[in-house]
Amino acid sequence: QVQLVESGGGLVQAGGSLRLSCAASGSIFKINLMGWYRQAPGKQRELVAVISSGGSTNYADSVKGRFTISRDNAKFTVYLLMNSLQPEDTSVYYCNADGMGYDLRPTEYWGQGTQVTVSS
């Protein structure tokens, strides 16, 4: 079993910053792509940013220039630095990873989600 545990959410004023962290643990054989998604009430879950094991990144247009994704492969951890936060960034943020446990079955893993609330 592989688990993803997020931390770092909270309440911040518009223009502020937060950093989210997500650590994978358990019977990890390999982690490939890691990323962050978000889901606001009444809306579909959407991609925020992803990063490959080699460091290639991709961002949603709405967060380009404000958010930065990074990872520490040795720690199986992915980070999301969020600057210039706006009320429309308010969502539950979910960590996502593609990888394999010791069973060697390609699997998509999800964290439990962390709430980010931006007040105006």
Image: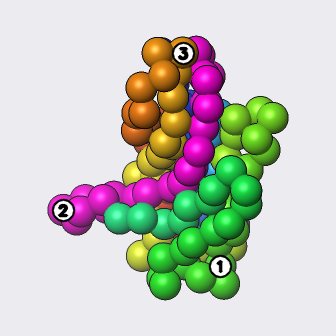
Q: Where is residue 70 in the image (x, y as percent from the top left)?
A: 73, 57
> In this rendering, does residue 18 appear at all?
no
Total of numbered circles in the picture?
Answer: 3
Element class at badge 1: loop
Query: Is 17 within the magenta?
Result: no
- Between 16 and 110, the one lying in front of the other is 110
Residue farthest toward the front in the current orientation of the protein = 104
**Mark closer to the observer (3, 1):** 3
- Between 101 and 96, the one lying in front of the other is 101
Which residues, given as a range, are shown in magenta?
Answer: 24-45
Mark sitting earlier along the chain (2/1): 2
Which residue is disc 1 drawn over? 66
Magenta: main secondary structure equals strand
Mark sitting earlier along the chain (2/3): 2
Dot 3, how many residues are within 10 Å of its Cα: few (below 14), some (14-19), or many (20+)? few
Which residue is disc 2 drawn over? 42
Q: Please give the name of the residue rendered at 68% of the width and 50% of the height, measured from the top-left corner.
A: 53
Residue 60 versus residue 104 in the image, above or below: below
Q: Where is residue 82 in the image (x, y as percent from the top left)?
A: 65, 67
**Mark 2 to mark 1 CA distance (whole Å):** 24 Å
Q: For the residue marked with disc 1, what is the amino acid? A: Arg
Q: In this view, does 35 lie to the left or right of 76?
A: left
Q: For the residue marked with disc 3, what is the amino acid? A: Tyr
Please identify the quarter of the rendering in which residue 11 is found: bottom right
Dot 1, how many residues are within 10 Å of its Cα: few (below 14), some (14-19), or many (20+)? few
**Mark closer to the observer (2, 1):** 1
Which residue is disc 3 drawn over? 102
Query: Is 34 within the magenta?
Result: yes
**Mark closer to the observer (2, 3):** 3
